């Protein structure tokens, strides 16, 4: 059973589509977890497109039970690595823009 308030906590829930992107599990895997009683869910819809909303903590426990702890660690590390690489890329772009602006200001000051 879900802990009190867990459904309302930021980041505690995710959609079946997000679960596929973050954990590599498909909708059928999630539905099997719901049918076996290991996952609680709520129906949702965005722009008329239905989706399943599930609890991240329950999904992670279910993944460990079905696919193993190593699988969960691997996919979480891959996700974190993707986020880190994206952040590094964003920072490099911002640094390049700042360096260009710095040069422009320095040139204008020297004239």
Image (cartoon, grey):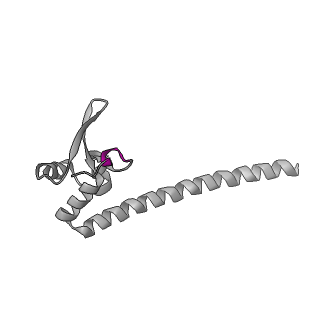
Q: Position of residue 14 (x, y in %)?
A: 31, 47
Question: At x 31% / y 62%, what residue is drawn?
Answer: 75
**Could you tell me if residue 24 is visible in this image?**
no
Q: Nearer the viewer, residue 47 or 1?
A: 1
The residue lying toward the viewer, choosing from 47 and 11, is 11
- The residue shown at (25%, 47%) is 54
Q: Quadrant of residue 99?
A: bottom right
Q: Which SS type dominates the magenta stretch?
A: helix
- Horizontal side, residue 5 vs residue 30: left or right: right
Q: Which span is picked out in magenta? A: 5-9
x, y (%) of residue 69? 25, 68
Q: Is residue 76 magenta?
A: no
Judged left or right of residue 91, residue 26 is left
**Residue 32 x/y as whole percent:** 13, 51
- Asked whether 89 or 68 is in front, the reply is 68
Q: Is residue 105 above or below residue 62?
A: above
């Amino acid at each position: 059973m879900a802990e009190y308030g867990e459904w309302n906590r930021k980041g505690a829930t995710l959609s079946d589509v997000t679960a596929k992107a973050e954990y590599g599990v498909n909708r059928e895997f999630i539905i099997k977890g719901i049918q076996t009683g290991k996952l609680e869910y709520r129906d949702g819809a965005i722009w008329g497109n239905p989706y399943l909303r599930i609890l991240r903590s329950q999904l992670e426990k279910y993944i460990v039970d079905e696919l193993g702890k190593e699988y969960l660690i691997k996919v979480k590390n891959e996700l974190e690595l993707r986020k880190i690489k994206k952040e590094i890329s964003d920072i490099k772009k911002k640094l390049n823009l700042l360096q260009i602006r710095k040069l422009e200001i320095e040139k204008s000051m020297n004239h």
